[in-house]
Image (tube, rainbow, N blue to C red):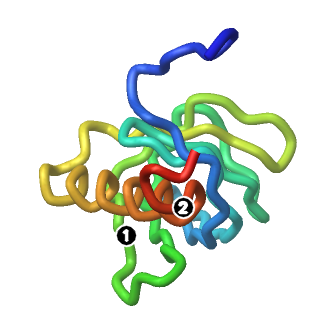
Amino acid sequence: MPGFAMRKSQRLKTFAPVRYRGDGIAGGGIIKDLSLSGSYIIGNVPVSVGMVLALQIFVPGDPELLLIERATVKWVKQSKFGVDFDTPQPKVAEQITKVIATLVKKQHGSPGNG
């Protein structure tokens, strides 16, 4: 695929509701570009670079919340901000990987169609 750059981990363009809280703030928004190492969020409560947040991600079709205890804000641009997951626990990393795999299958259909 020309022009395709590999990232250090697979990034999935997805839209999932998220709640975030940390340092006296609590907000909600939409998570986009989910990967094993981080994501970006469009939020309704401002955050600042360096803040540590706890995330609750509502994965479409999954009754269990995806909980990320430590996500550090790396950049902020208006209502958008990027977070880096601070080395997720193995169970959380496994859950993120599973969510990405499930959503990739839904977005691209079954293997062999293409």
The outermost residue toward the top is 2
Residue drawn at x 47%, y 53% is 53
Identity of the amino acid at label 2?
Answer: Gly
Quarter of the figure that contains the C terminus: top right
Mark 1, other Cα within 10 Å: few <14 / some 14–19 / many ≥20: some
- Quarter of the image for the N terminus: give it: top right
* Residue at horizontal 49 percent and vertical 69 percent from the top: 57
Residue under label 1: 66
Frontmost residue, 106 versus 14? 106
- Would you place residue 111 above or below residue 57 in this image? above
Q: Nearer the viewer, residue 70 or 5?
A: 5
What residue is pinned by disc 2?
A: 109
How many discs mark residues in the rendered view? 2
8 sits left or right of 12 in the view: left
With respect to residue 49, does 28 lie above or below? below
- Say if 106 sits above or below 114 in the image: below
- What amino acid does circle 1 point to? Leu
On screen, residue 59 versus residue 88, left or right, reads right
Q: Residues within 10 Å of mark 2 (few under 14, many from 20)?
A: few
In the picture provided, is 66 more to the left or to the right than 89?
right
Q: Position of residue 68 (x, y in %)?
A: 35, 59
The quadrant holding residue 95 is bottom left
The label on residue 90 is none
The answer to whether 30 appears left or right of 106 in the picture is right
Q: Position of residue 104 (x, y in %)?
A: 49, 54
Image point (78%, 64%), residue name: 44
Local SS, label 1: strand
